[in-house]
Image (cartoon, coloured by chain):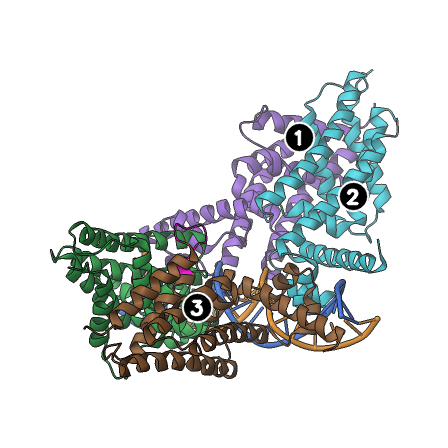
Chain colours: A purple, B cyan, C brown, D green, E blue, F orange
Amino acid sequence: MSFREERAAERKLNILKAAAKLFSEKGYHDATIEEIARELKYTKGSIYYYINSKQDLLFQCHELAMNMLLENINKIKESGLPPDLMLKEVIKGHIETLISEFNLVIVTLGSEYELDKNYLSIIIKKRDAYEDIIAGIIKDGIKQGIFREVPVKVVINLIMGACNWIGRWFRPEGPMSMQEIAQFFADYLVQPLMARR
Amino acid sequence: MSFREERAAERKLNILKAAAKLFSEKGYHDATIEEIARELKYTKGSIYYYINSKQDLLFQCHELAMNMLLENINKIKESGLPPDLMLKEVIKGHIETLISEFNLVIVTLGSEYELDKNYLSIIIKKRDAYEDIIAGIIKDGIKQGIFREVPVKVVINLIMGACNWIGRWFRPEGPMSMQEIAQFFADYLVQPLMARR
Amino acid sequence: MSFREERAAERKLNILKAAAKLFSEKGYHDATIEEIARELKYTKGSIYYYINSKQDLLFQCHELAMNMLLENINKIKESGLPPDLMLKEVIKGHIETLISEFNLVIVTLGSEYELDKNYLSIIIKKRDAYEDIIAGIIKDGIKQGIFREVPVKVVINLIMGACNWIGRWFRPEGPMSMQEIAQFFADYLVQPLMARR
Amino acid sequence: MSFREERAAERKLNILKAAAKLFSEKGYHDATIEEIARELKYTKGSIYYYINSKQDLLFQCHELAMNMLLENINKIKESGLPPDLMLKEVIKGHIETLISEFNLVIVTLGSEYELDKNYLSIIIKKRDAYEDIIAGIIKDGIKQGIFREVPVKVVINLIMGACNWIGRWFRPEGPMSMQEIAQFFADYLVQPLMARR
DNA sequence: CATGAATGAGAGTTCATTCAT
DNA sequence: AATGAATGAACTCTCATTCAT
């Protein structure tokens, strides 16, 4: 990558982050291109040198966030941990990514219907891949007798809901740290899966 | 209420439901007043005979939904059940209201930042009242030794997240019925609260 | 006039006065039919039993005001006073009508361009008649050597301007009464007309 | 000021003048943004690149006009003329500004109630400053024994009314020129102020 | 007589997007 | 690479007016 391209890529990333911030604060529609530009001390027109459209911007936010989540889960998948511990790691990693890349991930979680059909199907594919990995872990656990029999999809949705909702209420200045919350959620959500001995 | 007033109230409710449907399908911004009118075979202007503004419409959807949830939880609070069973009833009731009044409740859960400050504060007050009742039940359970010690707020957020997320994935034609899901969630989410004996 | 017609006429006058009040307070456009109706505890629809259109309402305000002014000046014309005193009476009468029928007259003086062409031409005819009478008095005075030679039209416009502007600043609670102002204006405005001896 | 900024300022002034023309011809409400745009061969939307709102446009017309009048009167105040001649100069200057910047000034004189409270208070402050200067001149004249004792405010209102009304009837093609009218008004309106010797 | 209800034409305004420079 | 300027489509909202009951 040439110097020029590098600089362009960097600027694009900045635009993405500024967009994500505003999208997550005010919603896709109420965040205007003008505001995004102002945030970066660009002018409205200049932005269009780097992006194709506002939709495109939204899509790339979604994509970036999903890639982060996928990267994280793939690492965990390789860890060789037993299913219950592995699932806990997944939950903790999910929450930690969610909070540390707050703006980006919140956009993904809160603006589905704003995405055009074509873009949306790409994102959904990634999300499905993500959930499939989780499903694999749970099924493993069941097969090994560590987890009891459960409707896997439903459990995943339950877990994802609990975790994703964190974006709505988490405040860094609150009484529990990100790590404490992540640990608490992991324990709370995995426990009912465990088979009785 | 006179015949006239009754009919007017009914029409207003219809408008509210049509609005909720479109808001939940396309989001607040992308649902236009014109579409809402078309849905009801009204004209754009006529809608404004019943409402003050689009914001107002959104607000009233929120309010209607919150009132339904509050009505439900208040009934359960009076039931005299032990905390664990009561909490399960709350979860089941929440999910059932959510699904049967899908559009309305989804609007409430998914469009916070679209609401003007003044309106929002009213809704937040209602939501706080709702969560306070749940907090009361959990604290009761802890006091009675039925539930273990937990950070109450965090647990509520966990439960609410899991439940509210249902709006994102539930399909009536899916393998589990609304009641089955509600029961499964209630059991799954209450179990980790139980004190070990 | 039958009882019914009488009542209708009375109500129409009330509507006219309410309209005049609102027109003068907020301007023709910003005063809505709804407000006029509310002022009279009618409903929007009912108003239309008595009037044809909002334009019509405006026109009739204009006409009523002009008729009052004409009635007044015609009485003075018959008085047989010498021109200078007669002109002073006209000025005083004009100002007193203006103030005591404030709303009505203000409408006439401040919303010419709101009137449709057809309506406007009728009002302008009346105004011309009014000014012609004043012109007659001044010309008389010149002929009799009481007034000096002046461009009559210009003087009339000067006098009318000074008087009509009163609607913009007069406050009944101010330091001078209506009569004092009227007398002061009459003296001030007639003096420069007097021929030197 | 750069070339670009200069052009932008010029365009803004054009918009102001076009707006003033239409406002004075048809009144604030009946003049639409679309018409103003059409007058300048712009599109409706483009206008908003230069202004914030229609109200803003009206306000700026008011302000521009008041600034012209103030500039004029301030120059005269410095002239060192005796009060009677100075007052005549003020009247002439007022009339000449009024006529040569017809549209702008007429807007100011005829659309008070169209201005929002906040805007209006700014304009009223300027108008008060203007009238205070005139008041100063008259009081000077009284103190020097050149003018007789009069209620100053009332006289100012009388003079302003006579002058401002000119906008309603002046036609450049009429028998008297702007200068002749201005001179006539100045003489006519100052004479009754003079102390008798 | 009175009115609740409905209508539709039109206004102001916003904003993503484009483009010449 | 950047930007000031312009555009037009779309949207919310208002209100005089009509009409069945």
Rendered image: mark on residue A88: 1
Q: Amino acid at mark 3?
A: Gly
Q: Position of residue B97 (x, y in %)?
A: 80, 44
Q: Read off the residue under disc 3.
A: C93
Q: What chain does badge 1 belong to?
A: A
Side (left or right) of B149 relative to D63: right
Q: Which mark is residue D166?
A: none
Span highlighted in magenta in the image: C168-176
Quarter of the rendering containing residue C196? bottom left
Residue C148, position in %: x, y? 23, 77
* Chain of residue at mark 3: C
Q: Callout 2 environment at 10 Å: few (<14), some (14 to 19), or many (20+)?
A: some
Q: Is residue B147 visible?
A: no
As helix, strand or loop, the secondary structure at mark 1 comes to helix
As shown in the figure, which amino acid type bears the numbered disc 2?
Answer: Met
Task: Tell me which amino acid carries mark 1.
Answer: Lys
Question: Chain ID for label 2?
Answer: B
